[in-house]
Image (tube, rainbow, N blue to C red):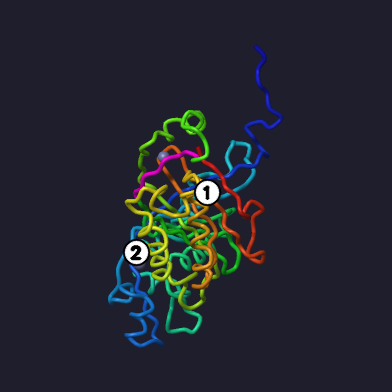
Amino acid sequence: MEAITSNFPHGEGRTCVITRRACFSASHLYRLPELSDDDNSALFGPCSIAPGHGHNYELIVTMEGDLNKYGMVLNLSDVKHAIKNEVTSQLDFRFLNDTWPEFDLSKPEGCLPTTESLVRIIWERLKSHLPLKSLRLYENPKLWADYQGNAMDAYLTVQTHFSAAHRLAREDLPQTENEKIFGKCARPNGHGHNYLVDITVKGKINPRTGMICDLSALNSLINDLVVEPFDHTFLNKDIPYFANCVPTAENIALHISDKLTNPINAIGANLYKIKLQESPNNAAEVYANVPESTIDTKDSKNQVRLLR
Ligand SMILES: [Zn+2]
Ligand SMILES: [Zn+2]
């Protein structure tokens, strides 16, 4: 048998993307000194209740570089120390508003320590130490922000869920044909899923509120336009759109994208992506129509990507 040899001893010179995860716990308070108590409460809801509240944050640092002669992009212990020195040792068990000068709200340039503003400032702290490609910061498993070093542009993702039944079949085809195409999913009485939906919006971080958009307004839209109408339904019969459209994961994701695009624009952000997970084994992703000025990846236009 012929031995496999490489022109790259130990992979040296080849490019690779690596990630490192780090966790910290911290508290924060959303309260702007220039606003009245009522205005703070109206704008930030319970997040404005003194003395604040906390989260167990999870940071995912993605880096890219060429392998060295030891087969590594970077020595992971150097990565670990950089993240600890520059980020977690300064934030862990702290009140974020009192940590970094960027969060000093007594100064006009001070910004609330939201997830999206925090991930941007973490990028600023790490960029001279690590070859960053992207950062993701989870405030909790159902809310996270992504940042790729593009000025004030950031992404915020909210995860929600609904339970629904469906049947995959085209009414214009005989049952035998439907079963050939859709398999067990074409059985006459349907079946159900606990759907997980990730709604990702893209926008500019407001330099004062630290927000891409009003999160409670976004949550209300998602609840009113997706969760309430879809939850505990038989999609084919209860949702008029699916009377003549097979409710595959792809079509459900597209329909959610179509329903949310304009309302999310109206609250000052852009819908970027919908990911619909039907089961642990399959999901569909739809990239919404983002205005040209904010498109930064070539695969971001009206595409469905399947993860099977
Ligand atoms: Zn919070
Ligand atoms: Zn199904």
Task: Choose mark 1 or mark 2, whichever is in front.
Answer: 1
Which label sits on residue 285?
1
Residue drawn at 50 percent across, 28 percent down: 180
Residue drawn at 30 percent across, 68 percent down: 53
| Residue 149 place in picture, x, y as percent | 59, 62
Amino acid identity at mark 2 = Ala
Looking at marks 1 and 2 on the same chain, the residue that comes earlier in the sequence is marked by 2
| Residue 155 place in picture, x, y as percent | 52, 61
Would residue 232 appear left or right of 78 to someone viewing this image? Answer: left
Q: Is residue 171 above or below residue 268?
A: above
- Quadrant where the N terminus sits is top right
Q: Are marks 1 and 2 in contact (CB under 8 Å)?
A: no
Q: Is residue 164 magenta?
A: yes
Would residue 231 appear left or right of 108 to someone viewing this image? Answer: left
Would residue 259 appear left or right of 3 to someone viewing this image? Answer: left
Label 1 Cα neighbours within 10 Å, binned few <14 / some 14-19 / many ≥20: many
- Front in this rendered view, residue 80 or 132: 132
| Residue 25 place in picture, x, y as percent | 34, 60
- Front in this rendered view, residue 252 or 218: 252
Residue at numbered disc 2: 26
- Front in this rendered view, residue 114 or 189: 189
| Residue 68 place in picture, x, y as percent | 63, 40
Residue drawn at 48 percent across, 46 percent down: 77
Q: Which residues are magenta?
A: 163-170
